[in-house]
Image (cartoon, coloured by chain):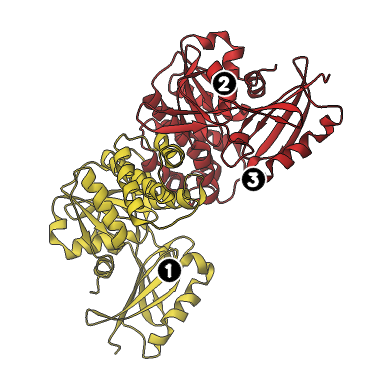
Chain colours: A red, B yellow
Amino acid sequence: MSRYEVIGDWGTSRLRLFRVEQGHVTARRDGPGIGAVGKEAEAAFAAVIAPWLEEGAPREIRLCGMAGARDGWVEAPYADCPADAAAWRAAAVRFEWRGTPLSIMAGLACVGPDGVPDVMRGEETQIFGAMAREPALRQGRHLIVLPGTHNKWSVVEDGRVVSFRTMPTGELFALLRDRSTLGPKVDRADPAQEAAGFAEGLERAGEGRLLASLFAARAMRLRGGRSEDWATGYLSGLIIGCEIAEIRSTLGEADDILLIGDAQLSVRYAQALGRQGLASQVLDGDACSLAGLGLV
Amino acid sequence: MSRYEVIGDWGTSRLRLFRVEQGHVTARRDGPGIGAVGKEAEAAFAAVIAPWLEEGAPREIRLCGMAGARDGWVEAPYADCPADAAAWRAAAVRFEWRGTPLSIMAGLACVGPDGVPDVMRGEETQIFGAMAREPALRQGRHLIVLPGTHNKWSVVEDGRVVSFRTMPTGELFALLRDRSTLGPKVDRADPAQEAAGFAEGLERAGEGRLLASLFAARAMRLRGGRSEDWATGYLSGLIIGCEIAEIRSTLGEADDILLIGDAQLSVRYAQALGRQGLASQVLDGDACSLAGLGLV
């Protein structure tokens, strides 16, 4: 009998596989994202897991993320919000792969307070993982945000995900910085200038006018003596500040705010939240993923 | 003595030259934008005007737009707002070119009610041209908008441009439509679907949450049965609707609203303004340009 299990997060841009033995991660392998492999998902998965299979099949495999998308490996449903961990786990699609039970976890779907539908695939694993690790999150009302390309802001209430909203803040920022006439022409990576711009962007965001404040990234260079790096920071602060103000009016207030994900980005969000008088706490993303997949 | 003058609008992406005889445009020639010619501006200008010079030098040449930018042909200053037509004309830079008096018109600079600086180069010519053509615009308070890549919203009051704000709405829309994960993958150019999306985007904009409403362009396809063309229209309506709401809170209300520029875009703006209870009137862009340069 094999002594290990495999869990993995297979997103659009990468596959991360973990080998778990007696509740501990003992190895990790990375592979291509679902976006790159398309219809060849099974072959891509087999190639990444191959070295481990040589020692015998794992007891079980659990995957979350875009592996379950329509264009993924095998489509898994969306569990409808409000959803607790049991309902979400029950919605997984299960099949046998080379003699091993394999689960692809469900996504989550919701309709926001303003009637707008939304979906996620992958992030829900970290959210349920955070609740598994932090008992305090299973009572009361908490706002959990996973900052990234498409930020997922979720309200969890008494152990259930009741609503969430995707904010494509990271994607918008990258477009403005790299592909618009507002971003820097030359990035000198001057952290002090960028930090000053970020603070000024946060302050400007307090007026709640994103579009009317964008062009200042350029005009302040022409007429206000600001630098290119200042503009990068300004755009980031402006967008994140506006995002936080909007999410509060969309999803409502909560007892506290938890950040899961990239450390550097989490620091930015903590600063931006603080600027609006909101305390936040950062959780470890990998630990939440593993806890969400339920084997560690 | 030559019987003609030359006026022109030399923007970032194109040069438009008009030959004027006794107050009438009798010929037109197009050439490359300042962005494409850089330091070779004079040679590029000479090449475009050459066929006319064969008949003798013009009495005068007047250019507006990016020809006067720092990276243009000869730098012209910005006239500070509030500015009337006389102050703006006086700020032009003048020199003799191959024996002909040549003026490059000034841009405009302002500091908005919220302390944000802003600049324009080229659009001010159409604004002053509109005031020259429409005596009613020289009294009272009017909002003039030139929709395009970077929309210029200007408040004119008793014949002066008192303030303006650049809204990079067109650039943002193009980035989202063509380069983001929110835009259509395949554009089938279905006008009915796009119009439905535009109307829904305008309605959603009424809630004033741009970032929180962006992802619906994708989620409504996944979960709301909407099409790719619907998404294109939705993004346009959402952004334009938010733009109008923001500009009203930035620049304040006015007696009326005038649109100058692209006919198709003007129709969209008129619809979006109407959705917010605002009437608007469309003026001919070329006629305003020519009147602003003061020879027709």
Is A296 positioned to the left or the right of B49 in the image?
A: right
Residue marked by disc 2: A90
Q: Earlier in the sequence, mark 2 or mark 3?
A: 3
Task: Examine the rendered structure and indicate whether residue A211 appears above or below residue A94.
Answer: below
Q: Nearer the viewer, mark 1 or mark 2?
A: 2
Q: Which mark is residue B14?
A: 1
Badge 2 amino acid: Ala
Bin the neighbour count of mark 1 within 10 Å (Cα to Cα): few under 14, some 14-19, many 20 and up: some
Tell me the SS state at disc 2. Answer: helix
Residue B146: % across, % down: 30, 56
Q: Which mark is residue A130?
A: none
Residue A105 occupies which quadrant of the picture?
Answer: top right
Residue at image coords 13%, 61%: B135
The residues bearing labels 2 and 3 have C-alpha atoms spaced at a distance of 26 Å
Task: Examine the rendered structure and indicate whether residue A169 appears above or below residue A185.
Answer: above
Residue A186: % across, % down: 59, 50
Is A214 positioned to the left or the right of B131 in the image?
A: right
Position of the C terminus of chain A by quadrant: top right
Tell me the SS state at disc 1. Answer: strand
Badge 1 amino acid: Arg
Along the viewing direction, whichever of A80 and A165 lies nearer the viewer: A80
Residue at image coords 32%, 39%: B205
Q: Chain of mark 3?
A: A
Is B293 positioned to the left or the right of A263 in the image?
A: left
Bin the neighbour count of mark 2 within 10 Å (Cα to Cα): few under 14, some 14-19, many 20 and up: few
Tell me the SS state at disc 3. Answer: helix
Badge 3 amino acid: Gly
The residues bearing labels 3 and 1 have C-alpha atoms spaced at a distance of 42 Å
Residue marked by disc 3: A38
